[in-house]
Each structure stands twice: as structure tokens, then as C-alpha cells.
């Protein structure tokens, strides 16, 4: 059974995309990173250049944007949650958002104590919401799907949030959070969107763009020819692609999901232009990507602009974790969790496994390729991470 399923996008358009401008109006990229730079403890996360691995794989370059050190939360999610909460809180307090900074909001923090933010999460997003709410003196309520690890649950509670695990999957948790927001006057802070709920998800997507702004600054004059980004509901993948397009770049762009929750891949295979959900249990180790329903904003952007939708097995993610944690001599290790490492594992498999020589050739991976992948999380489940690196690697690295 194949562990990688690649669907090349037959609906990709080549002309201007108005949806990109809707998500990122002029000046947004600068406003977002200015806000993040105002947060206490902000620093750009590392961009690792894996020259040894790139040489072994026969490509011109491989960069890994490592989110393990993002505000000591070990995941990129805080970029979206903090910016969205900042925007919503500023609006509630009557502050102008054009020059949004942490200090301006905190100076009115007492007035925001009555705001309750509610969300559903597989772990990282909920912790980001809890962290930001704690910083700004707001309340946070978090629902998690069944099977969520106790480490992720306790990490959320450690920031003062009310967090609980429900008897349902991620999409059930989203529906519960939305229902309680309506019934109790709370603010739903979700990075997925649907008709009638798009403003806050757009804020969250805008927040994610700091990741790619930092990456391009760190690259200097170099530019990737290929970018691979994970998708759960798709907001990160769509946000990164929007930011890249706004910068005038057009690299080859691949969207990566777990086989068990590959709603974007399923939608592309259907090839009717509509988003299609994956339902039921989603038994993948990639908890942060175990989402069955695409965000409608993300789907419209990725449907029209991504080059391929790729579904990967858990083995590919495990391969990536070990590959980054124990890299070839000369490369520095990158701590990457299950959801974070799948893109690195994918690149390795495409270039080292003869079974995928066809897709690799069609993607255009060769000695001239300069590849950027995003390690979206560090060891957010530390015990699982330690156990994974101790096990004998699958295949030869």
C-alpha cells in the first residue's frame, strides 16, 4: 500500500486571485509582524539550512522553518491566535487597530476582563488561545477531541484556561465551541471558516503570515523553488501561500495531510470545485492535522493556487521526526513533532524511494531545487517524541 498519495491540481489558475487580496489587503503583512514584535518574548524562530541532507538527497538546498521555539509554546499557532485576539480585543475596547500593539491593548486590559474566548483544538491552537488570553486578562474555554493527549490538555490548563476532552472528533469539538459561543455570548476563536464565520478566521490567517515574512528575511536574496506546507483545516497552508504570492513569488506549492484526514486531497480528487469532508475517527499520530472539514476560505485559495495535494502515512511523519532529530553529520538537529515533521519526511521519501520517482520528477525536484518546509511544532508531546527518536529508524537514513 502506498504511503504517499499525490494529486496534482487540475484547477490551479495562473492569473490574479482576488481572494488573496481579500485575505491580505495592502499593508497587512507589515502590520501583522509589527504586532508580533511588540509581544513580550518575541524573537524570530530559526530557519535551519540542512546542507548535508540536501546534498545527500541531490537537491540544491533544504530549509526548515522550526517553530519549536515560538514563545516557548513549541508551535506556530500562537501567531494566529495572538493577532486575532488582539484585533478582537482592540475592537471591543474601541481602539483603532491600524497601529495595533500589545502595550496599547494591555493599557486597557482591565476593560477586557469580561471577554471569554472559546475554541476547539487538537492541542497547539488551544494552548495559543489560552496563553494569549492569560497575557491580556481574558478568559479562555477550550474543547479537545477524544484521544487528545494528557500532556496537551495539561499544557492548556497551565495557562489558566478551562479545558476538557469531549466524546467526539475535532469537527464535533468545533461545533460544540460554536454552539456555546452563540448561547453564552462568548467569542468563538477558530481558524476554520464557514459561511457567516469568516472575519476571525481571516485574522488568524493574517497572523500566520509572520512565519513566512521571517523566513524570507532569513533567506536574504535566496528564494525557494518549492514549498511544502501542512494542512489541517488549511488556514496555515492558505495563509503562507497568500503571503508568498503577495511578495511576487510563485514557487511550486504542495499541501500535505495525513491519509486519515486528507480532506483537501479528497476534494481535489473529486475535481468538482467543491470542498469535501472526511468523517468519523481519524486515527493518525498527526493530531494537529486530524481535521476532516476544510476551511472554506482556505479551500478557495488552495484550490485555485496550490500545485498539488499530498496525503501521507504516519510512517512518513515518523521518518521526518527521526530525520530532523538525528540529521546527517554537519547539520544541526531540529526538534519536530508528528505534525511538524511530515513535510521533511515527505521530501526525503520523494527523493530517496524509487517508488516515488515519478511524482518527484513531475514535481520538478532535482539538483537545482531549493526546498522550504515548515516544522509547525516541536515536541508538544515530549514522551512520544523521546520514544520515537529511541526506536530504530524505518528505512535507512
Image (cartoon, rainbow, N blue to C red):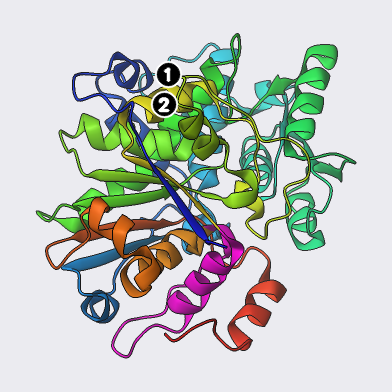
Can residue 340 be seen here? The reply is yes
Q: Quadrant of residue 19?
A: top left
Position in image of residue 122 (x %, y %) = 70, 47
- Judging by the rendered image, the residue that carries numbered circle 1 is 97
Q: Is residue 1 above or below residue 330?
A: above
Mark carried by residue 153: none
| Placement of 348 over or under 369, stated as above or below | below
The local secondary structure at tag 2 comes to loop
For image coordinates 69% across by 73% down, the residue present is 384
Q: Residue at x 82, y 43 (%)?
A: 163
**Residue 348, above or below 170:** below
Report the residue marked by disc 2: 100
Q: Secondary structure at mark 1?
A: loop
Tally of marks: 2
Q: Position of residue 376 (x, y in %)?
A: 49, 55
Q: Which residues are magenta?
A: 313-339
Q: Is residue 394 left or right of residue 280?
A: left
The quadrant of the picture occupied by the N terminus is bottom right
Identify the residue shown where x is 78% and y is 42%. 161
Q: How far apart are labels 1 and 2 at the CA level?
A: 5 Å
**Image coordinates for residue 234, horizontal then vertical, percent:** 50, 36
Q: Are marks 1 and 2 in contact (CB under 8 Å)?
A: yes
Q: Say if the magenta span includes residue 253.
A: no
From the viewer's side, name the closer residue of 340 and 114: 340
Is residue 87 visible to the viewer in this orientation of the structure?
no
Amino acid at each position: 500500500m502506498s504511503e504517499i498519495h499525490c494529486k496534482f491540481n487540475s484547477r490551479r489558475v495562473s492569473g490574479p486571485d482576488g481572494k488573496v487580496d481579500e485575505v491580505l489587503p495592502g499593508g497587512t503583512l507589515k502590520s501583522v509582524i509589527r504586532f508580533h514584535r511588540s509581544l513580550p518574548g518575541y524573537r524570530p524562530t530559526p530557519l535551519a539550512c540542512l546542507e548535508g541532507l540536501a546534498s545527500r538527497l541531490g537537491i540544491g538546498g533544504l530549509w526548515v522553518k522550526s517553530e519549536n521555539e515560538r514563545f516557548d509554546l513549541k508551535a506556530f499557532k500562537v501567531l494566529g491566535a495572538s493577532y486575532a485576539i488582539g484585533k478582537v480585543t482592540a475592537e471591543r475596547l474601541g481602539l483603532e487597530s491600524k497601529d495595533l500593539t500589545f502595550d496599547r491593548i494591555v493599557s486597557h486590559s482591565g476593560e477586557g476582563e469580561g471577554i471569554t474566548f472559546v475554541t476547539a483544538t487538537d492541542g497547539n491552537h488551544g494552548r495559543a488561545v489560552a496563553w494569549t488570553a492569560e497575557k491580556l486578562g481574558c478568559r479562555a474555554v477550550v474543547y479537545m477531541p477524544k484521544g487528545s493527549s494528557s500532556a496537551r490538555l495539561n499544557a492548556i490548563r497551565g495557562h489558566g484556561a478551562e479545558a476538557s476532552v469531549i466524546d467526539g472528533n475535532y469537527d464535533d469539538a468545533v461545533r460544540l465551541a460554536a454552539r456555546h459561543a452563540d448561547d453564552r455570548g462568548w467569542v468563538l476563536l477558530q481558524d476554520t471558516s464557514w459561511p457567516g464565520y469568516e472575519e476571525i478566521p481571516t485574522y488568524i490567517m493574517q497572523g500566520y503570515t509572520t512565519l513566512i515574512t521571517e523566513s524570507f528575511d532569513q533567506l536574504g536574496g535566496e528564494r525557494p523553488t518549492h514549498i511544502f506546507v501542512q494542512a489541517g483545516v488549511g488556514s496555515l497552508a492558505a495563509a503562507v501561500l497568500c503571503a508568498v504570492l503577495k511578495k511576487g513569488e510563485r514557487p511550486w506549492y504542495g499541501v500535505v495531510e495525513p491519509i486519515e484526514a486528507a480532506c483537501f486531497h479528497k476534494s481535489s480528487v473529486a475535481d468538482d470545485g467543491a470542498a469535501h469532508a472526511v468523517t468519523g475517527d481519524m486515527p493518525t499520530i498527526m493530531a494537529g492535522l486530524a481535521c476532516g472539514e476544510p476551511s472554506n476560505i482556505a479551500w478557495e485559495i488552495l484550490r485555485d493556487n496550490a500545485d498539488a495535494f499530498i496525503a501521507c502515512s504516519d510512517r512518513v511523519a515518523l521518518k521526518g521526526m527521526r530525520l530532523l532529530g538525528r540529521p546527517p553529520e554537519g547539520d544541526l538537529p531540529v526538534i519536530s513533532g508528528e505534525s511538524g515533521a511530515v513535510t521533511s519526511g515527505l521530501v526525503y521519501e520523494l527523493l530517496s524511494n524509487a517508488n516515488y520517482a515519478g511524482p518527484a520528477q513531475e514535481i520538478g525536484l532535482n539538483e537545482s531545487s531549493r526546498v522550504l518546509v515548515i516544522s509547525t511544532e516541536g515536541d508538544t508531546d515530549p514522551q512520544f517524541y523521546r520514544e520515537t527518536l529511541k526506536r530504530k529508524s524505518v528505512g535507512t537514513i
